[in-house]
Amino acid sequence: MDYNLFKYEFHKLSGIDLNYYKEKQMKRRIESQIKRSGFESYSDFLAALRKKDSLYEAFLSYITINVTEFYRNPGQWDTFEKEILPMVLQRSSTPKIWSCACSTGEEPYTIAMILAKYLTPDKIKILASDIDDAAIAKAKEAKYSFKSVESLPNEFKSKYFRHSEDDKFELKCLIKRCVEFRHLDLLKDDYPMDCDIIVCRNVLIYFTETAKDMIYKRFNKSLKPNGILYLGNTEQIIKPDKYKLKSLKTFYYTKDEELPEKPEEELQ
């Protein structure tokens, strides 16, 4: 069995289409995982994955790349709070925010804590989604290591966390209740509609250009007019007008329905 056949069989097994991920990176990650797990071939590894036990769950978490932390890239969150949120809150007192590819919850909970400076918790409703059910389960538990919360401002750590018996930082229910978690595959599932803000940071770099093109078009449909898309510091939309988006600030794009459609040949 070669890599292409593994992709095909794994898609049937899991519903995850690895063709949308950059092949060189993904192939290297999978082959590394095969060796670390003590297997010698794609076929042997796939046979083990078909049991859908702990190896399968660990592999799903591995390929969906759950690397995150609270307040990652603090300067960007400062911009989010001081420049982006005021614009959004002028238009809506209860903004609809979607944190996609949320991993183990650090990002949507960061958003909730920032919003709690300006809104009462009952007005904070954040949808958080991920393809990895194990990551979502950890997000709902909301217990984190010291390293995960290291970059958080002290005011957040003291106000919204307590030390658990297993020496973790446990998020208080006040903020946990602000976030609803949902399984969602960006490549095939329905997106939430009428979003004021979509946060999608540090995940699109792993997708092919074809996949990103599809996702950006769907983000546009998911946003309200003048809604905002917030990307990660390694991501940039080269021609945002192709998706009826325009650059608002570095890492931020806004939906602009007034942008004209461009012929495809002009976009090459």
Image (cartoon, grey):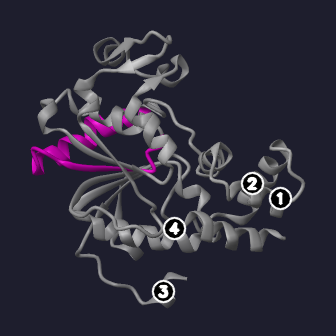
Residue 90 point in image, percent of width and height: 11, 46
Tell me if mark 3 has few (under 14), some (14-19) or many (20+) residues whose alpha carbon lies within 10 angstroms of its own.
few
Residue at the spot of label 4: 212
Residue under circle 3? 266
Q: Which mark is residue 48?
A: 2
Could you tell me how far apart the alpha carbons at marks 3 and 1 are, in whole angstroms? 47 Å
Q: What's the CA distance linking mark 2 and mark 3?
A: 48 Å
Residue pictured at 40% horizontal, 30% vertical? 141
Q: Nearer the viewer, residue 46 or 100?
A: 46
Q: CA distance from mark 4 to mark 2?
A: 31 Å
Q: Amino acid at mark 1?
A: Asp
Mark 1 sits on what residue? 44
- Asked if residue 17 is among those painted magenta in the image, a careful observer would answer no
For mark 2, does the 10 Å Cα neighbourhood hold few (<14), some (14 to 19), or many (20 or more) residues?
some
For badge 2, the amino acid type reads Ala
> 115 or 27: nearer the eye?
27
Q: Residue at x 51, y 49 (%)?
A: 132
* Residue 81 % position (x, y): 28, 35
Mark positioned earlier in the residue sequence (2 or 3): 2
255 displayed left or right of 88: right
Between marks 4 and 2 in the image, the one whose residue lies nearer the viewer:
2
* Helix, strand or loop status at disc 4: helix
> Toward the viewer: 240 or 102?
102
Please report whichever mark, 4 or 1, sits nearer to the chain's N-terminal start: 1
Q: Amino acid at mark 4?
A: Lys
Bounds of the magenta segment:
75-103
The image position of residue 91, as x and y in percent, is 11, 51
Q: Against 119, is 221 above or below? A: below
